[in-house]
Amino acid sequence: MIDLRSDTKTQPSRGMREAMASAEVGDEQRREDPTVLDLERRVADLLGQDESVYVPTATMANEIALRTLSEPGDELIAEENAHLLLSELGGPAVHAGLMTRPVRSRTGRFGPAEVQRMIRPGDDTHTPRTRIVAIENTHNASGGRVWPLEEIRELVATCRELGLTIHLDGARVLNAAVASGVQAAVIAEQFDTVTLCLSKGLGCPLGALVAGSHDLMRRARRFKHQFGGAMRQAGIVAAAGVYALDHNVERLAEDHARARQLAEGLQAAGVPVDLEQVETNFVQINVGALDLDASDALARLAAEGVGLSMTAHPGVLRAVTHLDVDGDDIEQAIERVPRALGVLARA
Ligand SMILES: Cc1ncc(COP(=O)(O)O)c(C=O)c1O
């Protein structure tokens, strides 16, 4: 199958497995694992932050960040389809006791005006205090779209003026950096906390990091332990992360080029694709516009040997390029997807 369901589907490469097999390890919980310490140092530098903390998943990184930045009863402002609102099973409420205030947007972005309109200063008797603004870059549900640096700067400046903390769900921030030509540190250093995921475009079997100042990361390490995320000989998997930073960052540009090639090929074949949305490694296909039900369309695609997945938007499927998808796969997909969706038959 040409597996375009997600960039989480990658298999660890031979080189990555070799790096894992020969990793030096120690007791991570006691901060004695040299490979984890190396990875944490490198990611902190990459993101322009003092420290980073290694955890098993980006979900845990987000949840620890939110807990670190707030107290139960505080409010979180985030885009309505942000991963941490839509796909973490209510984690912000469960783990951090946060009230959530969703912002509506088409591109996954919002600006100072929305924050100014929604913020509540809080008082001692009735009103909860708005405490965190969280943004996602790239933004998954809008199709892997990138926040322009200037928009991030304006939003961060407003949050600082209003005394709010600001979290970046940068699970795919390296896709944003590679696509925009802006260094990851220039994007990420502006935030109080940042999540980076290793198991998406970077091709690791697992792992993520949360980064921030020394003070915040001291607090984050306590929550990591409390959440059950403090590990033992974790260097065996952290080695995959070190390997990925050396080998799999710049090549994200190939995934982006393949997504663009796929999007243009599909559009030329008559498949409804919004080319403007294709900024990184996601292509969204509007099967609703073909009067197809999304589940039926997925089944037809699977029968043609192409794996796509659902999105947050009714009638819209997505194809995601990644390390294990090559140029031949894209050419094949450009033939098979229109056939599966009956587009050529209609032409
Ligand atoms: C933007 C974003 N943040 C966080 C996550 C969570 O990652 P994980 O499923 O590895 O915990 C995802 C996963 O798709 C994501 O897309």
Image (spheres, helix red, strand yellow):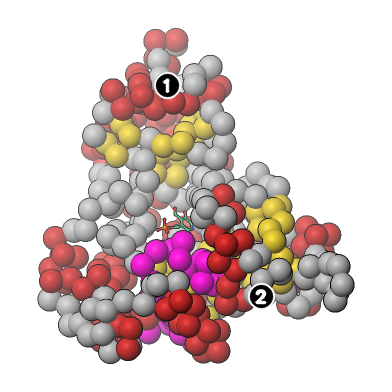
Residue type, mark 2 in image: Glu
Residue 190 in view of the camera: no
Residue 71: numbered disc: 2
User: With respect to residue 253, does 222 lie above or below?
Assistant: below
| Residue at image coords 14%, 60% | 14
Q: Which of 185/318 is in front?
A: 318
The answer to the question of whether label 2 and label 1 lie on touching residues, with beta carbons closer than 8 A, is no
Left or right: 246 as drawn, with respect to 23: right
Q: Which of 179/221 is in front?
A: 221
Where does residue 336 sit, x and y in percent of width and height? 31, 25
Q: Is mark 1 within 8 Å of ligand 1?
A: no
Q: Is residue 74 magenta?
A: no
User: With respect to residue 264, does 244 lie above or below?
Assistant: below
Residue marked by disc 1: 296
The mark lying in front, picked from 2 and 1, is: 2
Q: Is residue 51 magenta?
A: yes
Where does residue 21 sit, x and y in percent of width and height? 13, 71
Pick whichever of labels 2 and 1 is earlier in the sequence.
Answer: 2
Residue type, mark 1 in image: Asp
Quadrant placement of the C terminus: top left
Q: In the structure shown, which secondary structural element does the residue marked by tag 1 occupy?
A: helix
| Residue at image coords 52%, 53% | 89
Q: Which of 103/76 is in front?
A: 76
The magenta segment: 41-66
Q: CA distance from mark 2 to mark 1?
A: 44 Å
| Residue at image coords 48%, 83% | 222
Q: In the structure shown, which secondary structural element does the residue marked by tag 2 occupy?
A: loop
Q: Which of 53/342 is in front?
A: 53
